[in-house]
Amino acid sequence: SYAFTLLPTLASLLLALWFVSVAAGMGALGLYATTPGLPGESRGEWPADSAIGRNPRRSTLLVFLHPHCPCSRATLSEVNRLLGPRDGDLDVQVIFVQPPGAAPGWVKGPLWSGAEALEGVRIHADVDGVEADRFGVKTSGHALLFDERGRLRFSGGITPARGHEGDNPGRQAIMAREDGTSAEPVMCPVFGCPLGNDEEFVR
């Protein structure tokens, strides 16, 4: 009958629509993963009013994280990769930003525990995001490398995309600086959630 002759056409149409929907969804996810966050306005030198201690004998790497950003697990993995070959050459500090309105202990979670598991890493809770403002960072996963004189040598992310691990320009730049093969300051995009008073995360 006429209805039965339409079935193959309808099936083909539905299959085509399904493929288009899947392709569009994958494209949106890919765009989201590769869209960087706000670059911030990092200063060229260590802020004089910062309460975070800087190591005067070696480079200091600060990594600012939103404690509930799912993308930032990849950042911690990259920090661990940086620690491996450095053999204590880097003073690494992870700063978890606690925005205004967050309950006490809000920063403590899986990411905090993950940072605690990294040997030799110091951890800070940045209440009300005071230090994030001082250092001019806006996005979770923003890493800042300062030399022993407090000069900024690297500013940016150390992941290739949101929530993705693997070789990336940020990690390469930090390793090149510490290996002595590059002395010029480098900036890279940061892939992560926004820092600050985000109602989606402040619970």
Image (spheres, rainbow, N blue to C red):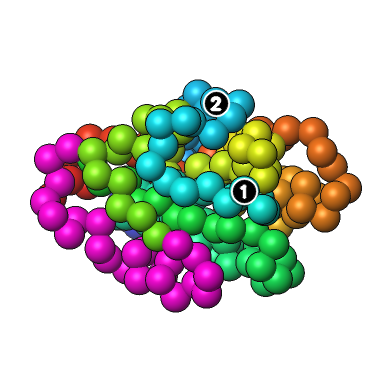
State the image coordinates of residue 68 (x, y, percent, origin top left).
Answer: 30, 54
Depth check: give the residue in front, 31 or 100: 100
Q: Residue at x 66, y 53 (%)?
A: 57
| Residue that sits furthest to the front in the current view | 56
Q: Is residue 23 visible?
A: no
Q: Residue at x 25, y 63 (%)?
A: 108
Q: Which residue is mark 1?
A: 56
The relative height of residue 138 versus residue 25 in the rendered view (above or below) is above
Q: Residues within 10 Å of mark 2 (few under 14, many from 20)?
A: some
Q: Secondary structure at mark 1?
A: loop
Q: Residues within 10 Å of mark 1 (few under 14, many from 20)?
A: few
Marks 2/1 in contact by CB < 8 Å: the verdict is no
| Residue that sits furthest to the right in the current view | 181
The residue range painted magenta reads 100-122
Residue type at mark 2 is Arg
Q: Residue at x 31, y 35 (%)?
A: 130
Q: Quadrant of residue 94?
A: bottom left
Of the image marks 2 and 1, the number of the one nearer the N terminus: 2
- The answer for how far apart the CA atoms under marks 2 and 1 are is 18 Å
State the image coordinates of residue 107 (x, y, percent, origin top left).
Answer: 25, 56
As for residue 114 lying within the magenta part, the answer is: yes
Q: Residue at x 40, y 51 (%)?
A: 95
The relative height of residue 3 versus residue 88 in the rendered view (above or below) is above
